[in-house]
Image (cartoon, rainbow, N blue to C red):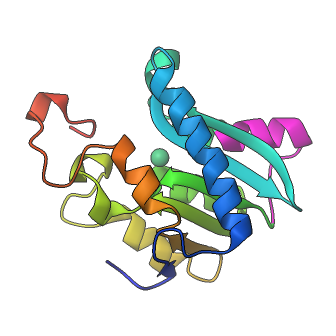
Amino acid sequence: MNDFAVASVASGDADPADIGYMQRALGWAKKGEAADGASPIGCVIVLDGKIVGEGYNETEMRHDPTAHAEIVSIRRACESLGQDELRGATLYTTLQPCGMCSMASIWAKIGRIVYGAGREDVHEMYFEERDRSTVDYILDAYKDDITLLGGVLADECAPFYVGPDEVVPIQDQVNR
Ligand SMILES: [Zn+2]
């Protein structure tokens, strides 16, 4: 685990506002679990105390490998605001974001990411790491632009995902 820009809190031991928005993101994860072609990763984007975009992972539904919950929510937020940046916004997601979504957040000028379950809480297939960690690289390179807080309601988020020690056949792994 890096410590460039990542802080973490014990599950549930976070700012009440962060907990409230994470509960809403968990609601999206539940909807994603129930929806055909979606998956249980929920995201909520908040700007100036208002929810401006939210959603769940729609990659299978849309036949779009980039339709992660965070990307779906960034698109909705920008559409709803009629602008192409979200400066000062906080992005809440039930699972630590991948490299693509971390980078998209930087392009969107999102200043803060708050996530629930972290890499250590879930199966490695959720992350695109090979010999190097994309997320660690991004967080180091852009440490002045973005901060991450992990572990918010991690105990409630983690059960939506395959656990770190579960055996998953290689052809069923989402990143292979
Ligand atoms: Zn992603």
Q: Who's the residue at 62% across and 55% down the image?
A: 22
Query: x%, y% of residue 38?
Result: 47, 24
Q: Quadrant of residue 147?
A: bottom right
Q: Who's the residue at 87% across and 37% down the image?
A: 80
Q: Quadrant of residue 143?
A: bottom right
In the depicted structure, whether residue 147 falls above or below residue 33 = below
Query: x%, y% of residue 23?
Result: 62, 51
Q: Main secondary structure of the magenta part?
A: helix
Q: Nearer the viewer, residue 22 or 81?
A: 22
- Answer yes or no: is residue 143 visible: yes
Query: x%, y% of residue 79?
Result: 83, 35
Quarter placement of the N terminus: bottom left
Q: Nearer the viewer, residue 150 or 173?
A: 150
Q: Which residues are magenta?
A: 73-87
Q: Nearer the viewer, residue 127 or 40?
A: 40
Is residue 35 toward the left or the right of residue 50 in the image?
A: left
20 inside magenta stretch? no
Is residue 169 toward the left or the right of residue 119 in the image?
A: left
In the depicted structure, whether residue 68 falls above or below residue 4 = above
In the depicted structure, whether residue 94 falls above or below residue 6 = above
Q: Nearer the viewer, residue 23 or 161?
A: 23
82 inside magenta stretch? yes
Number of numbered discs visible in the structure rendering: 0
Quarter placement of the C terminus: top left
Q: Quadrant of residue 2?
A: bottom left
- Answer yes or no: is residue 98 visible: no
Q: Who's the residue at 77% across and 62% down the image?
A: 89
